[in-house]
Amino acid sequence: MGRSFSSRALVAVSSVLAFLLVGLAVLQYQWSGRISAADAQREREHLNSAAQLFASEFNGVVSQSVRFLQNEANTALRSGAPLTGTPKLIGELYYLNLQPQKPPEVLRLTAEGMFVPASRPEWLPAARCSLRGVEDPSTIFAPIFDIVSVEHKVPGEAQITKTIKWGMDRCFVARFDTKYVSETLFPSLIQKSFGGTAASEYDFAVVSLNRPDQRLYGGVLHADLRTVFPAMDVSLPIPLPPAAATGSPPRQRASVLIQRENHVFTSSLTSLRDTGLWELQIAHKGMPMAAAFERKRGWDLLVSLGVDVLLFAAVAFLVIAARRMQWLADQKMRFVAGVSHELRTPVSAIAMLSRNQADGLVTGPDKVKQYGELIHQQSRRLNEMVEQTLQLAGIHSGLRRPAKDEVDLRSLIEDSIGARREELTRGGFELEVDLASPTPPIVGDSKLLRTAFDNLLDNALKHAGGGRWIRVSAVHAPLEKEIRLSVEDRGDGIDPTDQTEIFEPFSRGRAAVEAQIPGSGLGLSLVRSAAEAHRGSVTLVSRPGRGSTFTLHLPL
């Protein structure tokens, strides 16, 4: 690979990147903990705010129903006209008249909007009108009263005492339409108050504080958040003191004196507020909210780690790509230098021989024949090198795609040997051919395969040495589903240090260079490229001083 980027430099860069990756991961872990805690706190604040909005919206619906009972329902009761426009929140509606020295009167609102005599319902434990309503929190209490107000201002004091005489003897008592509340009202209020995202991530329940088994909405939850809210805000219609009575508006109205029959007590206005009837429970779906945020933190850490790993891999690939580009540049320069050198030798020889002939330095038929033979050899060498260079460039560029023909390797081997029969005989080579094993045809490029085998045979002819022995064989390996085509010689062999790069372009063994054996260094590289173009490979088994065996593995 690259010469300018050493393996030591790559290890150093990788170590630095790994150290930075670990450091970044530690920082992300710490930051994620803080961010997760902040997110959880913001989520709780959001849920609390939304729960308050939910309670306010629900109280608004209840208050509207109370005003309807104190106004429209009371008017219809007095006039005897049918009551229309009853709020959907009200399921059952009763009127109680418990005036002293009169028998209790209980009226029920019918579907036609009329109040008719009825018995006390079971869900109303006792027929009474109370400021706190009935014990069942799913009821609405609306008192009906007439106010007689008497003001008394103590001289020298800013406090105004207002005496209100009123009777808690008549009232409307309504019960929620639980189906409407659970199926329509609460889902719409949850959607409005919490939003679509929170409504899909959390479970909600509304339960009674006094009766935990009584639920208006939802099931049993292990609540992450609980919010108590009253069913309504009760306030009495107390008129402000007139300005004429004191000459100027009062500076303070701190208390109200309430008188009912023989009982008198003083209470601040805020004490008339309900302390809470319902509890809104919120639970994260599937797991507690803390566990959900911890799980989200884990996923965030995993994503961050994945990004870090991708970043590390990208930098590593950039380093590898830089080394690869440098290697390709080196190979390109090596290729150009090799081609230039190999072309220069035969071209120079042809130029010199032809110049001698042209200058008349070659005389006699034998000399002319000798020069002609030398020119022919150099021309053939030049032609072979140019052809190999073009073939190798075509394969590596992808412009030349191998054909897909049915190739008979037995015929291919016999034709290649036949073309070199004269050279083998003239060189005194002993050739063994083992084609006894039947070899099925393969699908491939016959010209490219012929070139690969020719190069293996030429390589054996050049490097057979004094042994002058070559063996060619073709074996079908059914288990591996391939054909192994081997060319073996008994030459000097290849040094183990040269075997790793023997298939690289223009790579030649030191022994061949020292022995001045002619060659371009492209033949074996072309063999490997041809094998890879057929999804195969080429292997080498060589021992110095005992020869080499090149095997072409061609899958069926």
Image (cartoon, grey):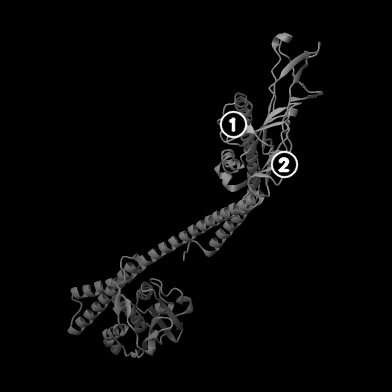
In primary-sequence order, the first of circles 1 and 2 is 1
Residue found 57% across the figure and 57% down from its top: 17
How far from the left and from the top, in percent, is residue 459? 36, 81
How far from the left and from the top, in percent, is residue 129? 72, 31
Which numbered disc, 1 or 2, marks the residue closer to the eye? 1
Check disc 1 and report its element: helix, strand or loop.
loop
- The mark total stands at 2
Q: CA distance from mark 1 to mark 2?
A: 34 Å
Q: Which residue is mark 1?
A: 114
Q: Specify few, some or many for label 1: CA neighbours under 10 Å numbering under 14, 14-19, or 20 or more.
A: some
Q: Which residue is mark 2?
A: 209
Q: Is residue 203 above or below residue 154?
A: below
Going by the image, does 294 lie left or right of 461? right
Q: For residue 348, say whether it is visible.
A: no
How far from the left and from the top, in percent, is residue 61? 61, 33
Residue found 34% across the figure and 65% down from its top: 397
Of the pair 350 and 221, the residue shown nearer to us: 221
Cβ–Cβ below 8 Å for labels 1 and 2? Answer: no
